[in-house]
Amino acid sequence: MLFGRLRRWATLIKKDIFVLWFAFRDPRTPWWIKLATVGLAGYGISPVDMIPDVIPVMGLLDDAVIIPFGVMALLRLLPRQIRISSTERAEAQRVRGKKAFGWGVLLVVLLWLAVVIYLVKH
């Protein structure tokens, strides 16, 4: 029962992440929401956490709380028209079954790799 609820919640968060992705790509989206979205994505894949992962339970729990609540907060801050059109685009993408994250994930990973290489050299 608990795992079923968690699975449904994870599915909803995944849908919301797609909506946020399409909102990020929309030129009408305010720059500060785009900046916050990049920051949230960077925090999600960053090896640096607010609570280190070596601390039992709490170390992994911070990611499981911060990322979903950050996504929900950003979606609430989106202007209504952008949220509606992004939701429609995400639903259409899901129906077609295409991957929307490929280039975005690659870009973020390459950015972090560049930062790590820069820090190692200096």
Image: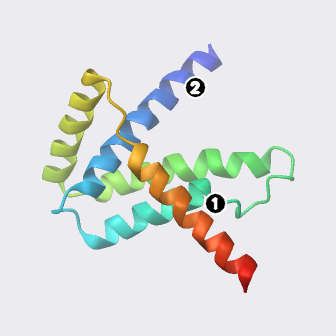
Look at mark 1 in the image and give the residue it sits on: 46
Instruction: Identify the mark at residue 6; answer none if there is no mark.
Output: 2
Q: Residue at x 67, y 70 (%)?
A: 116
Point out the image quarter for the N terminus. top right
Q: 1 left or right of 90?
A: right
Q: Are marks 1 and 2 in contact (CB under 8 Å)?
A: no
Task: Looking at the picture, tell me which residue is in the foreground, 45 or 70.
Answer: 45
Q: Quadrant of the C terminus?
A: bottom right
The residue depicted at 79 percent of the width and 59 percent of the height is 52
Label 2: element kind? helix
Closer to the camera: disc 1 or disc 2? 1
> Earlier along the polypeptide chain: callout 1 or callout 2?
2
Q: Residues within 10 Å of mark 1 (few under 14, many from 20)?
A: few
Picture layout, residue 94 above or below residue 75: above
Measuring from the top left, give residue 23's x and y in whole percent. Answer: 26, 52
Dot 2 amino acid type: Leu
47 is higher (above) or lower (below) than 64: below
Relative depth, front residue between 69 and 60 = 60
Spot the residue most to the top.
1
Callout 2: 10 Å neighbours few (<14), some, many (20+)?
Answer: few
Measured as percent of width and height from the top left, residue 118 is found at: 65, 78
> Mark 1 and mark 2: span between their CA atoms?
24 Å
Q: Which amino acid lies under the numbered mark 1 shown in the image of this protein? A: Ser
Q: Quadrant of residue 37?
A: bottom left
Q: Is residue 10 above or below residue 37?
A: above
Snapshot colouring: rainbow
Q: Label for residue 114?
A: none
- Element at badge 1? loop
Going 30% across and 27% down the picture, which residue do you hit?
Answer: 94
